[in-house]
Image (cartoon, rainbow, N blue to C red):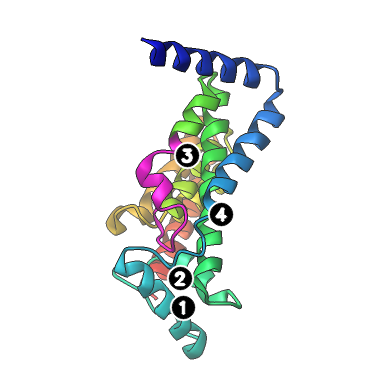
């Protein structure tokens, strides 16, 4: 009973604490909390999954060969290219990149919830400290990268920034490879129809975006 009472006091205190802040200060505070809670683990290696070590080997291979090589099927070109371009191929720099993308994912989630007047602070903190999300926010795996791009796509879609939403959705390479190249094209077409843009222009943009996404994945 006492523990429940103390928990209630803590929740009320946090609610009052965040209520006293404006929106930008709350967002900055959450971003700092999320990022700082990851940085203490960035030097713990590439990760527990063997595929994380595959990214490290693949980054060295791409740097030496100057050609695209996939770390694992069907290929995840965004992560693989970024890792290959890094001047230092150490675990801590890979993990810092993942921590930054994880923080941006939480920021996008906060902005989405805040746009629809939901509990943005609580919801974003729940995402940030979900075990699966937390574990993979300080390793070399691409899970949180994809979630960041997916949430970014949803955010920009809500703001009717069609092409930017399509770009983020196309970068979300963790979606099944047989539909990742077309889901953002449907977003372009759908929003274009809502905005009553020219039909042929919308179709052209969708097909070009799909072709580029397929080309990057295949080659």
| Cα distance in 3D space between marks 3 and 4 | 14 Å
Q: Looking at the image, is mark 4 or mark 2 earlier in the sequence? A: 4
- Choose mark 3 or mark 1, whichever is in front: 3
- Choose mark 4 or mark 2, whichever is in front: 4
Q: Which residue is drawn at 35% across and 46% down?
A: 132
Disc assigned to residue 128: 3
Q: Residue at x 58, y 74 (%)?
A: 86
Query: Which residue bears the numbered disc 4?
Result: 39
- Residue 9: say if magenta: no
| Cα distance in 3D space between marks 1 and 2 | 7 Å
User: Judging from the image, what secondary structure is the residue with disc 4 in?
Assistant: helix
Q: Looking at the image, is mark 3 or mark 1 earlier in the sequence? A: 1
| Cα distance in 3D space between marks 3 and 1 | 28 Å
Q: Looking at the image, is mark 3 or mark 4 earlier in the sequence? A: 4
Snapshot quadrant of residue 34: top right
Which segment did they paint magenta? 127-143
Q: How many marks do you count on the picture? A: 4
Looking at the rendered image, the quarter that the N terminus falls into is top left
Classify 10 Å Cα crowding around label 4: few (below 14), some (14-19), many (20 and above): some
- Asked whether the beta carbons under mark 1 and mark 4 sit within 8 Å of each other, the answer is no
Query: Which residue bears the numbered disc 2?
Result: 80
| Image x and y of residue 199, in percent | 49, 42
| Cα distance in 3D space between marks 2 and 3 | 24 Å
Left or right, residue 86 beside residue 49 = right
**Residue 188 versus residue 158 in the image, above or below:** below
Disc assigned to residue 59: 1
Question: 141 and 115: which one is in front?
Answer: 141
Please indicate, yes or no, whether residue 195 appears anywhere in the rendered image: no
Disc assigned to residue 42: none
| Image x and y of residue 64, in percent | 50, 89
- Asked whether the beta carbons under mark 4 and mark 2 sit within 8 Å of each other, the answer is no
| Image x and y of residue 99, in percent | 53, 54
């Amino acid at each position: 009973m006492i523990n429940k009472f103390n928990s209630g006091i803590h929740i009320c205190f946090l609610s009052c604490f965040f209520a006293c802040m404006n929106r930008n200060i709350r967002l900055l505070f959450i971003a700092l909390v999320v990022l700082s809670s990851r940085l203490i683990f960035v030097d713990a290696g590439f990760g527990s999954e063997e595929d994380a070590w595959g990214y490290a080997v693949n980054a060295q291979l791409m740097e030496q060969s100057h050609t695209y090589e996939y770390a694992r099927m069907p290929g995840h070109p965004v992560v693989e290219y970024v890792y290959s371009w890094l001047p230092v191929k150490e675990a801590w720099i890979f993990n810092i990149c993942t921590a930054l993308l994880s923080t941006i994912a939480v920021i996008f989630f906060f902005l989405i919830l805040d746009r629809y007047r939901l509990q943005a602070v609580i919801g974003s903190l729940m995402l940030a400290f979900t075990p699966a999300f937390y574990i993979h926010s300080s390793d070399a795996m691409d899970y949180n990268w994809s979630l960041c791009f997916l949430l970014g796509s949803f955010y920009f879609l809500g703001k009717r920034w069609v092409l930017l939403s399509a770009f983020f959705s196309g970068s979300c390479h963790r979606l099944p490879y047989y539909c990742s190249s077309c889901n953002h094209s449907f977003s372009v077409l759908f929003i274009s129809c809502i905005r009553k843009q020219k039909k042929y222009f919308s179709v052209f943009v969708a097909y070009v975006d799909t072709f580029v996404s397929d080309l990057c994945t295949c080659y």
